[in-house]
Amino acid sequence: MIPRSVANSIEQALKRQAAVAIIGPRQVGKTTLAREIADSHPGALYLDLEAREDREKLVEPVLFLRQYENSLVVLDEIHRVPELFSSLRGIIDQGRRTGYATGRFLILGSASIDLLRQSGESLAGRITYIDMGPFYTLELPAGEPTLLQLWLRGGFPGSYLAEDDSTSLRWRTDFIRTYLERDVPQFGPRIPAGVLERLWTMLAHGQGTLLNASRLAAALQISASTAQRYIDLLADLLLVRRLPPFHRNVGKRLVKSPKVYVRDSGLVHALLGIKTYNDLAGHPVAGASWEGFVIENLIQAAHERTVASFYRTAAGAEIDLLLEIPGQGLWAIEIKRSLAGRPEKGFYIACQDLKPARRFVVNAGSGHYPIDAEITAIGLHELAAMLVALAV
């Protein structure tokens, strides 16, 4: 088993909070990690709420869970029983009065907005949220072969650890189909699977471009508001990221639309039918796919309160990724797929506008070296490690 970087954060949160929620898309390994944590807590109970047998145990949740007030209870796929949150509030408050104030519940959810809405109403002040994504670069051995495999296959364990590229692609294709046919209908009104798949594929083709819901809607023959609602759902399911534009009064005409990315690079490639690295290297989406891959890895490595955005003006000044890091100021990051890329003119102009504290060019190599007095060229693994060190 590949150790997950969030494991220690979860254990620490259980020591100080009554409930901890692990938020992440399906198949990132939440259940595997939760079971491992449960094994280290004597008497822990695991309930899979997708299983009818386990849901029926919670018909009278207060009565049933009273038997486990001194044990950790893992509630997997809690969105299947959203009404449970109101009961958990009473159970937690009762536990605080009787000396069981921490480490009561480990909750797993596959949709951020659904879980936040339900628990926000009932468990405010009683729950800590921890994001868990697919594998990222620091969870795997450093080196170019590992990095390229992670980029091609993405970080979902079933895809990354597949025995070959064909098996990996088949896993991701099945994953997409399962989401469209089974999982999406659980989280909102009925959406035609074919329309949503075409939208998801169009987003993959337009990886890293400015979001234009009207253009997407016209191609799908649906309304712009419907297209926006579908994109919202994919974002809520943690499958798509809308990277917001940087907002600050710098006296420039700033782009106001977010950039949109399919969050996992392996899903980008599966949606576009890209099987091998050879196929990917010559594909028009390669540069944008690498950009999205780097952005996801750096955001995952950064402090949880880091604010990510991009900067672009009507005059052409542009920064691929801005990170506002607590206590560190603004970091400007240019992303290049080559081994020794240099920033474009627009990056220099944008840095004159914003005057960031640190400036980097992330490339596909390893190590770091100065490009000039203010800009450092650096590999993805090294910059991610730098961000993690600041987050500790």
Image (spheres, grey):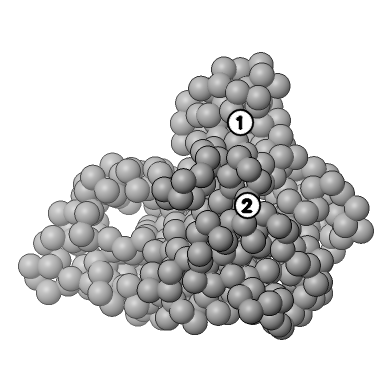
- Residue 49 seen anywhere in this rendered image of the structure: no
Mark 2 / mark 1, whichever is N-terminal: 1
Q: Residue at x 72, y 63 (%)?
A: 343
Q: Which picture quadrant has residue 280?
A: bottom right
Q: Residue at x 12, y 67 (%)?
A: 96
| Residue hosting label 1 | 212
Q: Where is residue 292 in the image (x, y as percent from the top left)?
A: 66, 55
Question: In the figure, is residue 71 to the left or right of 109?
Answer: left
Which amino acid does the dot numbered 1 rest on? Asn
- Distance (Cα) linking label 2 and label 1: 19 Å
Label 1 near label 2: C-beta < 8 Å?
Answer: no
Q: Which of 354 and 78 is in front in this view?
A: 354
Q: Nearer the viewer, residue 83 or 196?
A: 196
Dot 2 crowding, Cα within 10 Å, few <14, some 14–19, many 20+? many
Dot 1 crowding, Cα within 10 Å, few <14, some 14–19, many 20+? some
| Residue hosting label 2 | 318
- Residue 222 seen anywhere in this rendered image of the structure: yes
Q: What element carries label 1?
A: loop
Q: Is residue 221 above or below residue 162?
A: above
Q: Is mark 2 on a helix, strand or loop?
A: strand
Q: Which picture quadrant has residue 142?
A: bottom right
Q: Which picture quadrant has residue 374?
A: bottom right
Q: Where is residue 223 in the image (x, y as percent from the top left)?
A: 57, 17
Q: Position of residue 60 (x, y in %)?
A: 23, 48
Which amino acid does the dot numbered 2 rest on? Glu
Q: Which of 48 and 132 is in front in this view?
A: 132
In which quadrant will I find the C terminus?
bottom left
Q: Which residue is drawn at 78% across and 63% down?
A: 337
